[in-house]
Amino acid sequence: MARKIRVLIAKPGLDGHDRGAKVIARALRDAGMEVIYTGIRQTPEQIANAAIQEGVDMVGLSSLSGAHMSLFPKVVQILKEKGAEDIIVFGGGIIPVDDIPELKKAGIREIFQPGASTEEIIKYIQENVKTT
Amino acid sequence: MSKNIQEEFERWKKTTLNKVLSKAPEREPSFQTTSHIEMKRLYTPLDTEEIDYCRDLGFPGEYPFTRGVQPTMYRGRLWTMRQYAGFATAEETNRRYKYLLQQGQTGLSVAFDLPTQIGYDSDHPLSDGEVGKVGVAIDTLKDMEILFDGIPLDQVSTSMTINSTAAILLAMYIAVAEKQGVKSEVLQGTIQNDILKEYAARGTYIYPPLESMRIVTDIFAFCKEHTPRWNTISISGYHMREAGCTAVQEVAFTLADGIAYVEAAIRAGLDVDSFASRLAFFFCCHNNFIEEVAKFRAARRLWAKIMRERFKAKRDESCMLRFHTQTAGCSLTAQQPDNNVVRVAFQALAAVLGGTQSLHTNSRDEAYALPTEDSVRIALRTQQIIAYESGVADMIDPLGGSYAVESLTHEIEKKAAEYIERIDGMGGAIKAIESGYIQGEIAESAYQYQKEIETKKRIIVGLNQFQIEEEPLRDILRIRPEVERYQKEKLARVKKERDSGRVKQTLSVLKKAAQGTENLVPPILEAVRAYATLGEISDALREVFGEYKER
């Protein structure tokens, strides 16, 4: 039997805009996933540690403050240093399209832009996590 | 007369209306506002029968202020056109301010970056990546001097979106004024200073609620003596609305926070009539036009009653709800961004018809980034077109007396009052926030709203209907990465040049004050004058007060 997908939704940096993160967390739960939401003001270290401790399949990062170029790659990097590069990191928020190639190069697998539906995000996660 | 209307209404329904309904049903079985208030097909005098004109509406500039807080409203003076702006360094933001003033803006509104808002200097590890991003970076008085360089502080009014570090930024503003030869008594402006909604929605808290409330009331007391024309708080529904709550919840949660501040100030020994007239409010204006107009009118009437009946305020000014409005950021779409100009125009019009005292209109590109200069100009022009061309500013409360508007005003007031009663039952806003009740209500509404969009129960033009193939906007404002380094170097220079003995001494005086009960603003002002950094001052208080952790 397929196990439940586990996802950590996290708010790196000082940004307090958590409407999107909370909506996504709830939508993923309603789609049958196990979701841990970190709350706001997390450092990349805290997020990576939580992801490892909770044994999640994926980490979703949300940032609307423009700090994504510094913070998102750090999460990926720390996961890698701790031997947890199998945890897939994706992100969303106010992220200019021109930043996306660099973020992807740094190992963030997908970026969702304003207007993305929860359905798209659910589909993305389901298609990219092996549950059997 | 009303019997006649009732009979005629019934006759109309049975004949004229039914003839059409039997052949062509309406678009929806029922129509609702964002607050789940049922919008009737038609409002008639029957819906306003309970309203007593003199008691419930009255006249502008008089209790209960339903029709507006000034006797002449915009016929006397237009609302203040105040675009929230700030990015990168004080140098760059100063240039944007001068541009905006040149374009006819009538007040300044400072956006600070997150480290400034949360009490970290630009060289703090947690500031990494955030310096100058969502607003201007301020580390010391030096930055504030640059920010207002060439802008005479006795001639502008300045609003500052600053909360947990409000006392520090206010002190810096006063110190800059001193250097310009301007006395604090003439300074006009507002600090947001609304810490409760930071725990509920916005997130820039530092200290635990009780200690934060002490700083808030210390500011009230200080300003009463030293800056009598300054709005000491801007009790904000905006961010809770942006976080997802409905119009009714926005009124309810904001006024519940207002009640908590008034209670705290009274507990701190202040007489209600000595500070209440300096309380200001800040609301959002979203898409549902009539509901928004009614919301502002309802909030005014409800606050007036709370101040008079609950707090026994004697002066009419104490009962006046004066407010700033910003159009709804969360209503902007990244898709077909020019459509946002139209959205903003309708929202701005609703705010004006609702009697706002000042207004920020969002820019079309804000679903992407902070706005470019061109986009901000269109946003400002939108206000100017409403003010000078539309004619709505030439009469007071032109929608007053509309059966629909009056009925909704009444309904929103009633529903908000019920919410406040529930919050009172929990022990007030602080308790309702500590228990997570308000956050839960906001999150629930936000989720429902998103579901409505995804199931197309709610149509957002260009997002879930009328989409086109399009390229994302690329011509957006970018904050140069050098900003962080530049800001850190500037900070290092200031630290080297200042009298470090004096800094140490003022910080230790501040800490002692925090351990005792004396007003914290004067020692903060002394530290600011000595060029102590925002981070050092915040740390001094952190050591005494501790830090709040989100539940």
Image: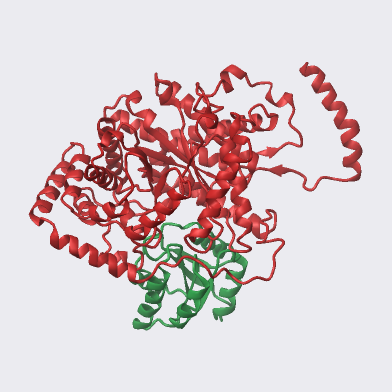
Chain colours: A green, B red
Q: What's the residue at 56%, 27% (across, down)?
A: B67
Residue situated in front as seen by the camera: B329 or B305: B329
Residue B517 x/y as whole percent: 18, 36
Q: Is residue B444 visible?
A: no
Residue situated in front as seen by the camera: B474 or A56: B474
Residue B463 x/y as whole percent: 65, 61
Residue B450 x/y as whole percent: 60, 57
Q: Residue furthest left?
A: B501
Question: Is residue A58 depicted above or below B238 in this figure?
Answer: below
- Quadrant containing the N terminus of chain B is top right
Question: Is residue B415 depicted above or below B152 in this figure?
Answer: above
Residue A80 x/y as whole percent: 38, 82
Q: Is residue A106 left or right of residue B510?
A: right
Q: Is residue A132 visible?
A: yes
Q: Quadrant of residue B451?
A: bottom right
Question: Is residue B235 depicted above or below B318 in this figure?
Answer: below
Q: Is residue A77 left or right of residue B447?
A: left
Q: What's the residue at 28%, 68% (across, down)?
A: B486
Q: What's the residue at 44%, 38% (across, down)?
A: B281
Q: What's the residue at 23%, 52% (across, down)?
A: B141
Residue situated in front as seen by the camera: B452 or B121: B121
